[in-house]
Image (spheres, helix red, strand yellow):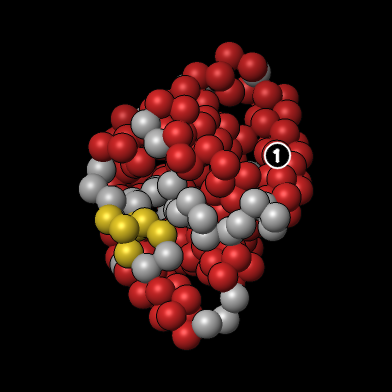
Amino acid sequence: MHIEPGLVSEAKIALSYATAAAAGGVALYHIARATKEQGLTSVALRSLIATAGVFCFFEVLPHFPIGVSEVHLILGSTLFLILGAGPAAIGLAMGLLIQGLFFAPSDLPQYGMNVTTLLVPLFALYEVSKRVIAPGTAYVDLQYRQVLALSLVYQGGVVTWVAFWALYGQGFAAANLAAIGTFGVAYMAVVLIEPLVDLAVLAAAKAIRASGSVLVTPRLYTAA
């Protein structure tokens, strides 16, 4: 997923272990916070839902090799808004691992780079959400401009990290820059789809009125 084999040589790949470890540390913070809010059972159930969703994003939904990587419809902001940052992080990491173990073993050496690419934008999204979403606003009441901003942060973060790994691995040759540009333009098309998915899912959640459910983040229905 995302970083193709050989893009970063074995001699340089050690950096990805450090970035993945740092992302893992932040993930543990969010997991602990979610556990304190709703308990371990809720976090486990939401993480299972997130993992199943991420697996579908990777293996079931259409994906295309373009430029330096592949374009997937990874609904990072959707996972965040419905399940919360901690369970979403577990789902992204586990879905990526399942894909590598059972469907794309050649991706496993790139796992550190790929998990960094998926998780760091999620945490950036969390920080931006505190500025984009006013206190006292439940997620089910978000407007298009707000979910668009969240989608831009997540998908833009993914593109930025893929570009970083490509430049780190292959340098600034014209062909590499062109491949990065092609990937970036194609991937940002996801931003046209994700906010609409977010609004549809949030509208469905609002209609269901499942406030207090262990299957969703408390912020979905309850204002901070």
Residue furthest to the top: 41
Above or below — where is 212 with respect to 65? above
Above or below — where is 91 with respect to 16? above
Report if residue 51 is visible in the image.
no
Taking the image as shown, residue 11 lies to the left or right of residue 104, namely right
Instruction: Give the quadrant of residue 99.
Output: top left
Residue 203, image x, y percentages: 31, 44
Mark 1 neighbour class, 10 Å CA radius: few under 14, some 14 to 19, many 20 or more: some
Instruction: Give the quadrant of residue 89.
Output: top right
Residue depicted at x 40% and y 26%: 102
Residue 33, image x, y percentages: 72, 32
Taking the image as shown, residue 152 lies to the left or right of residue 171, namely left
Q: Quadrant of the C terminus?
A: top right
Which of 11/154 is in front?
11
Residue furthest to the bottom: 174
Residue depicted at x 46% and y 40%: 106
Above or below — where is 85 with respect to 142? above
Above or below — where is 163 with respect to 119? below
- Residue type, label 1: Gly
Residue depicted at x 56% and y 70%: 170
Which of 160/48 is in front?
160
Residue 209, image x, y percentages: 37, 30
Report if residue 11 is visible in the image.
yes
Instruction: Give the quadrant of residue 144.
Output: bottom left
Which of 218/99 is in front?
99
Label 1's element? Answer: helix
Which of 86/62 is in front?
62
Residue depicted at x 37% and y 68%: 67
Residue underneath mark 1: 24
